[in-house]
Amino acid sequence: MLRRVLPSRPEARRILLGTLLSAVGRGLTLPFLFIYLTDVRGLSDARAGLVIGWLGAVMLVLSPLGGTLIDRFGARRVVVPGLIIEAGGVGSLALVDSTASAVAAATAIAVGGSAIWSGQSTILASLTGDQERQRVFGLQFALLNLGIGVGGLISGAIVDTSRPVTFQTIYVIDALSYLAPAAILLSMPGVGGKLGATGASGAGRASGGGYLTVLRDRPFRRLVIFGLVLTTCGYAQIEVGFTAYAIRVAEVTPRVVAWALAANTVMIVLSQLLMIRRLEGRSRSGALATVGVVFATAWLVLGAAGFVGPGNAVVAALCVVACSAIFGFGETMLSPVMPAITNALATDELRGRYNAMSSMIFGISGVIGPVTAGPLIGAGGGLYWSVLVIAGCLVASLLALSLRPLLSLAQDGRAPLADPADAPEPAHR
C-alpha cells in the first residue's frame, strides 16, 4: 500500500523525507507555545493569544507576496530562505522574556513561514502527475503527522513548566530541524524552478492576471470560504483553544495534552493510507462535508471533558485524548482532498498564487482563532467556545456540499484521470 502511494519521481520522495525530518522538530513544540508563554514566561492568557494571533496576521499579510514570488522566480528561491529565517525565529523563542520579545520571535517565524507551505505544495505538484497528486498530498500529511507525533512523545516526556530549560531545549532542536528540508532542496538544483510558459504571453498571464484571475475562479472562491470556516473552527483552535480548554476547563495536565497529540498521530498514521484508497474515485466535496461533521464531533467530546474534568480526572483525560484522535480521523480526509482540488483548479502560471491563497486560509484563521479562544476561555467562557466551534464546523459541511455543483467530475474526483498507458477517455461514475 505504501509503494502504491509513493511518488514515482525520486525528487518528490526526497521532498517528503524533508517534510518528515522537520516535522519531528515541529512536534516537539506544537502543543506547548501557549503554555510556554503563559506558565513559563509569565504572559497572561490574553497576551499569549494575541502573540500567536500576531503570528497568523503577519503570515496572512505576506502570503500573497510569497505566491507572487513563487510564480515569478520559482519556489526554490523562496522556500530555502524562508526555512532559514523561520529556523532563526523558532530558535529565538528560547530567549523570550517579555511580550515584546515574544512578538519579535513570532514575527520572524511568520516572515519565514509565510511561503514555505505554498512553495512546498507547488514543488510537489510540479513533480507529480494529476493521477497521483491526491495520493502524494495524503502521504505528505501522514509523514508530517508521524514526525509531529514522534516529537510530541519526546517533548511530553521531558518538558516541565518548573524547568524553563526543558522548553528552551525543544525550541532549539525545532529550529535546527528546519535546516533538513533546506539542505535537501539545495541538493537538487533542478527542482523548484519557475513553472509555466516563459514567453511573453505566459509571463503576462502570470503577472498581469495575478490574484484577480485567481479570485475570479468561482469554485476556488467557494473552496476558500469553506476552508476559512473549517480552519477557524478546527485547526486554528489546536494551539490555543484545544490546549487552553483542556488545561483550564477540563483541568488535565500538559502531559495529557502531549498524549492527546500522540493519539492524533496514531490515528493519522494508521488510517491515512487506507483513507487515500477509500477516497479514490469518490466525491471530494462530499469528503470535505464529512470532515466538518467529524471535527464537530471531536469538539463535542472535548466539551464533555469540561463537564466531568473537575470531578473525574481520568474520564476528562480520556475525553481530551479521544477528541484529538477523532480530529485526526477528519484530517485524513481533508489533507489529500483540499490541495488536490486546489491544484486541479490551478494553472502552472498561477499555481504558486493558488497554493498561496490556500495557505492564507490558515493565516486568516490563525488570527481569528487564538485572539478569540484565548480571552474567551480565560474569562470563563469555555462553554460558549465549545458551542461556537461545533456550530462553525457544521456550517463548513454545508459550504462543502454547495461546492459540488461548481466542480467538474474530474475536479471533484469522481472521474479519475487515466494513466498514460490507459485509454484516453476516463471512465465516468
Image: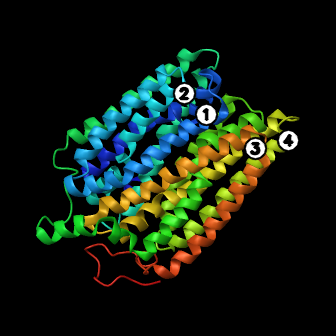
Q: CA distance from mark 3 to mark 1?
A: 28 Å
Q: CA distance from mark 4 to mark 2?
A: 34 Å
Q: CA distance from mark 4 to mark 3?
A: 9 Å
Q: Secondary structure at mark 1?
A: helix
Can you identify the residue that label 1 sits on? 47
Q: Nearer the viewer, residue 44 or 147?
A: 44
Residue at image point 63% right, 62% down: 292
Foreground: disc 4 or disc 2: 2
Indicate the position of residue 307 as horizontal and vertical percent values: 84, 44
Q: From this view, report whether residue 21 is shown above or below residue 300.
A: above
Residue at image point 82% right, 33% down: 313
Can you identify the residue that label 3 sits on? 319
Indicate the position of residue 171 as horizontal and vertical percent values: 47, 26
Indicate the position of residue 242 as horizontal and vertical percent values: 66, 43
Q: Residue 308 shows which numbered tag?
A: 4
**Callout 2 amino acid:** Thr
Q: Quadrant of residue 231?
A: bottom right
Can you identify the residue that label 2 sits on? 99
